[in-house]
Amino acid sequence: MTSMENLAQFVAAVGLVGAGVAFLTAFAAELPIRFASRPAAKLAPLCLVVALAALIVSLGSRGIQARRWPVGSLYEFTLLLSLFLVAAYILLQRRTPQAQLGATISILALALVVGASLTRPTSLDAKTLPPVMQGLWFPLHTLLLAIACGLLGLAASAAVLQLLAPQSQCTAAVDCSMDLGYVALSLGMIAGAVWGEMAWGSYWTWSTKETWTLATWWACTIYLHVRHRRAWRRSRALWIAALAFALALTTIYVTPSMARWTRLIGPPTY
Amino acid sequence: MRYTEVAWLVILASCVPGGLSLTGRKDSIDRDMASSVWRMISSMRLALWLLFALLLCMALASLLPQIPPGLDGPSRTEWMQLAAQRLGRLYPALSVSGLLDVFHSPFFAALVVVLVLNTAACTLHRARSLLRDLRQGHMAALGTLVTHLAVIGLALSVAASQAFSWQHTTLPIAHGKSHAIPRMPGWSIRNDGLHLVLNQQQTLGYTAQVSLLLHGQLLHQGEIRPNAPLRAARTGVWLISYEPGVAVKARDKRDQPLILQDAAGQSTTGWVFASLSSGPAVFSLPSAGMDFWVSAPQSPLGQERFALTVQRVSTGELLCDREVQSGLDVGLGEIFLTLQAAPYGTYGIKHDPAAAVLLVSALALVIGTSLTLFSGKGRPL
């Protein structure tokens, strides 16, 4: 881990703490949040933008140091996920940012950054990826899935807020981020399938990770199909949006353990 | 009636409008049966039930050991024994119900088939309204149509792939040697050289030069890497991995090559190759009455040194037991042995006529979905 990477991660964490506190204060005081407004009201979004920039610097410096795309380990993916979570909020909420949603995103992103820092590799051991992970398709696949997970995280946060506080008007945020997340997830899965075909000659092998990624995609598909149905109360569809992100997190953090538990013979070698 | 059939009936009946009263309505008992069945098959409710059922299957499959694809013969038996040890009393029930091979089980296939039929029926059922929307210039309708057709295309291409594709994933080939390609009479693949890029015992990368031959004539040649196969003759050749190997040559004091016999009993004059992936390689030198064993004592990656043990067959006398440098001669009286590092490339070969359709369908699905979601006048999928 380089000092620049370390420093940038610290700045990101401070920025996220600042954004969380500012959003919560704004929510409590019922202050309007604007990305382009008076300085006092801009504090929370500003902190978020600083955190985003710091995360970009952190991952960028790691990538430069390792001379590859910083998408090769769980640590790097977690940082990417927090980056895209924050970026999704900033981009999709730039006109009418909601304080509660901003606070939720800040806390979630902070948890991811702290979690990544606690589980980071002691050295830059992922400097060289296994040969099978080199090339274009693996980084593209990972990048698209990180974007999708960031968007699904935003959708799930907005959905949970909407469920807890029905007056919060977060449904548009859920819909928009689910739409974009679904497309990114689909493209990510296709890129992963192409990578698998290039590496092993198989588009799909029903590995644990693939299975749960497909489960996530199906949850998103169900959401897109039921959200406008009268038979489905809106709250049920929102639960599906939250479920999709829970499935995505399971795919990222739980499936390696599942794979270890269910594997009876040696792991595949790359 | 088995519990699975009951479950199916419950699912199907719940999808019939006015059928099993999950919705609490019983007002359509007199409706035409065919119409009801059609509405059931083309209903979104059925699709949702199926998706939830498939999700459940997938969750189960990821919590239970699953038979690795392509495992057959003794390996499959060994896997079954391991599963029986791990699962204990649950094993017989899980094995019989197909839960140890969920993704290739009849019930999983049935769910997928019904889902595809449902998608097709749903598309047909809504064709008129979709066409009306299309005439009015609603791109979202086109997107919905493309998405659903893409799902059907995906399913058909997967089925075609299952029916007509074949794959061999482990063909270890020594340097300079060729291997007949199964299912392609007259064709063979030759390993023209494997190149490892190493850094302190870590493999940074590896490439291989391979040739595709038809009746011994060179037709295609190229370099392949782990994620860059060679595609030719409607077939792909993959470099899956590599394994340590050794090339051995024996000669007498007049520099005349001697006949060497490998573990399979095949006699060769000149270089003889053997894999070291599953332990020492065994050779014999019949003219000198010697057997010898070669193994890679250090990391098999570099293979700069080998452990060589030579024994006289008649007396069992140990003639040599030491490490030798790759490429250098080892003198055993009037006989000289040369050991050379010769890693094996492990290749995979696949023929899949439906691969392109599969990819196009997947891309069409994304394009269709994007049209539906982002074309402004969106409509539900």
Image (cartoon, coloured by chain):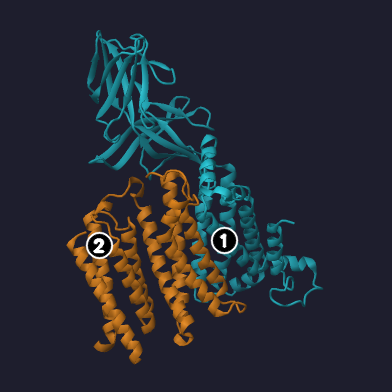
Return the chain for callout 1: B
Q: Position of residue A253 (x, y in %)?
A: 40, 61
Residue B40, position as x, y percentages in the image: 70, 67
Q: Quadrant of residue B211?
A: top left
Q: Which image quadrant: the C terminus of chain A?
A: top left
Question: Three-letter amino acid code at disc 1?
Answer: Leu
Residue, far front: B89
Chain for numbered disc 2: A
Q: Is residue A98 visible?
A: no
The residue that mark 1 highlights is B56
Give the residue at x 35% y 52%.
Answer: A136
Per the image, label 1 sits on a secondary structure element best described as: helix
Q: Nearer the viewer, residue A89 or B371?
A: A89
Palette colour of chain A: orange
Q: Secondary structure at mark 2?
A: helix
Foreground pick, B317 / B380: B317
Tally of numbered discs: 2
Residue A160 spot, x, y in % from top left: 46, 78
The tint chain B carries is cyan
Horizontal side, residue B38 vs residue A89: left or right: right
Identify residue for label 2: A60
- Dot label at residue A68: none
